[in-house]
Amino acid sequence: QVQLVESGGGLVQAGGSLRLSCAASGRTFSRYVMGWFRQAPGKEREFVAAISWSGSRTSYSDSVKGRFTISRDNAENTVYLQMNSLKPEDTAVYYCAADSTYFICSDHACYDSWGQGTQVTVSS
C-alpha cells in the first residue's frame, strides 16, 4: 500500500478553478493506477477520474468530462486533478486513491489505498 495525502481544496466561486494534488509515499508509485473520487453530504462516494501507470490512459465521469483533467508526475510521486468551470454541484470532499492492479477502474472497491480527503466548496 501507499500513503496518500491530498491538498489544494478550498472555497471557490462558480466558474472558477482549483488544482488538487495528491502526494504518495513509496517507491512503487508508478505501478499504481491512481483515481479521484468525491463524496457530497448525504451521497455515496462517486468516481471522478482515473489515470494509468504511465499516464497514457485516462477515464472521467460524464459529470466532469471536459472540465476536469487528471495527470501524474511519477518522478514526484504526485497525481493532480485540475478542475475548471466549477459548479456548485462539484462541492464535495475529494479523495485520492491508489489501485495496485493494471486496469483503470471506476469502482471504489478496486482501490486499496485512500487519502484523508480535501474539501472543495463551490459557491453560486
Image: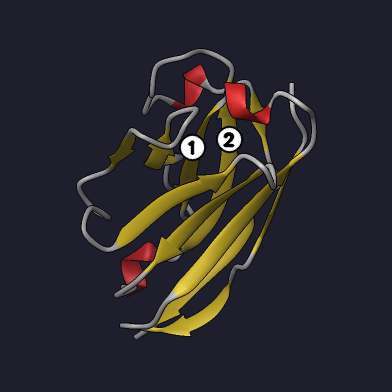
Left or right, 60 with respect to 98, comes to left
Q: Count residues near mark 2 (Cα–Cα under 10 Å), then give few for <14, some for 14-19, many for 20+.
A: many
Q: Is residue 90 left or right of residue 10?
A: left
**Residue 70 vertical placement versus 114 (above, below):** below
Q: Give the residue at mark 1.
A: 35
The reply to whether the C-beta atoms of the residues labelled 1 and 2 are less than 8 Å apart is yes
Q: Position of residue 75 (x, y in %)?
A: 67, 43
User: Residue 43 vs residue 116: left or right?
Assistant: left
Q: Distance from label 1 to label 2 (Cα)?
A: 5 Å
Residue 117 seen in the current view: no
Q: Which mark is residue 90?
A: none
> Could you tell me residue 43's position as x and y percent?
42, 46
Depth order, front residue of 101/44 = 101
At 34% from the left and 71% from the top, the residue drawn is: 84
Nearer to the camera, 34 or 44: 34
Asked which secondary structure carries label 2, the reply is strand
